[in-house]
Image (cartoon, helix red, strand yellow):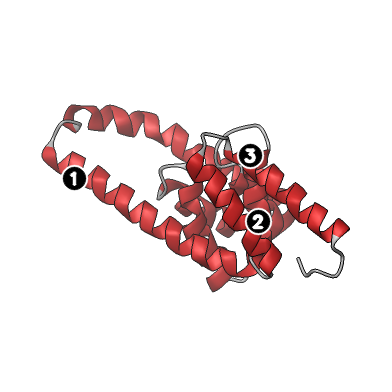
Amino acid sequence: MNVFLLYLLLLKATVSAFSGMTVIPVMRDELVVKRHAITDDQLNTAIVIGRSTPGPNGLHVVCVGFFAAGYPGALAGLLALVTPALLAIPILRLLHAHREGRRMRSAIHAVVIASVGLMVGTAYDLSASALNSPAAWGVAAAALVVLVASRLDTVWVIAAAALAMLAISFFLPGLPV
């Protein structure tokens, strides 16, 4: 894949999203569905790597770039990740005067609602490749209960789910995972 095009696509995702995980629907649509540059499994792997490693929120953008175009793609992902932050300072300075306006608050609420809808839809699409057995569904359900019922960090829940799947495949080798 052309690295400059990859940068533009990842930049589109990072500019149109306002937190780390909200870039996933845009990246999936552009790189998995439309261009077939990566697979759903690679996107899932990038999300896990991004969530389980220390560093900035949104590190999965760099991983997606790597999966799409190797090390040059990872560099494109890194540049796409930092570009909005560098542009945000002058833009926020301009918008500071209008922050209390009714239109501005309405626009922010609309963006939040749209982001939640995109994340729910993408989670549904990604679950098709990740939840392919009863064991995976059980571990996912248990992880969801733990996330909802506790304040445990997501990284620990992902690690516990991964260990549970490894234990199931090791101790119950006949059970599909």
Q: Position of residue 19 (x, y in %)?
A: 45, 42
Give the residue furthest to the left: 102
**Mark 1 or 2, closer to the camera:** 2
Give the residue number, with chain letter if any, for mark 3: 155
Q: Is residue 58 above or below residue 89?
A: below
* Crowd around label 1: few <14 · some 14–19 · many ≥20 (10 Å): few
Q: Is residue 121 left or right of residue 103?
A: right
* Crowd around label 2: few <14 · some 14–19 · many ≥20 (10 Å): some
Alpha-carbon span between mark 3 and mark 2: 15 Å
Q: In the rendered structure, which amino acid carries the disc numbered 1?
A: Ser
Q: Position of residue 95 (x, y in %)?
A: 24, 32
Alpha-carbon span between mark 1 and mark 2: 39 Å
Give the residue number, with chain letter if any, for mark 2: 139
- The residue positioned 42% from the left and 47% from the top of the image is 15
Tally the numbered discs: 3
**Of the image marks 1 and 3, the number of the one nearer the N terminus:** 1
The N terminus: image quadrant: bottom right
Q: In the rendered structure, which amino acid carries the disc numbered 2?
A: Val
Give the residue number, with chain letter if any, for mark 1: 106
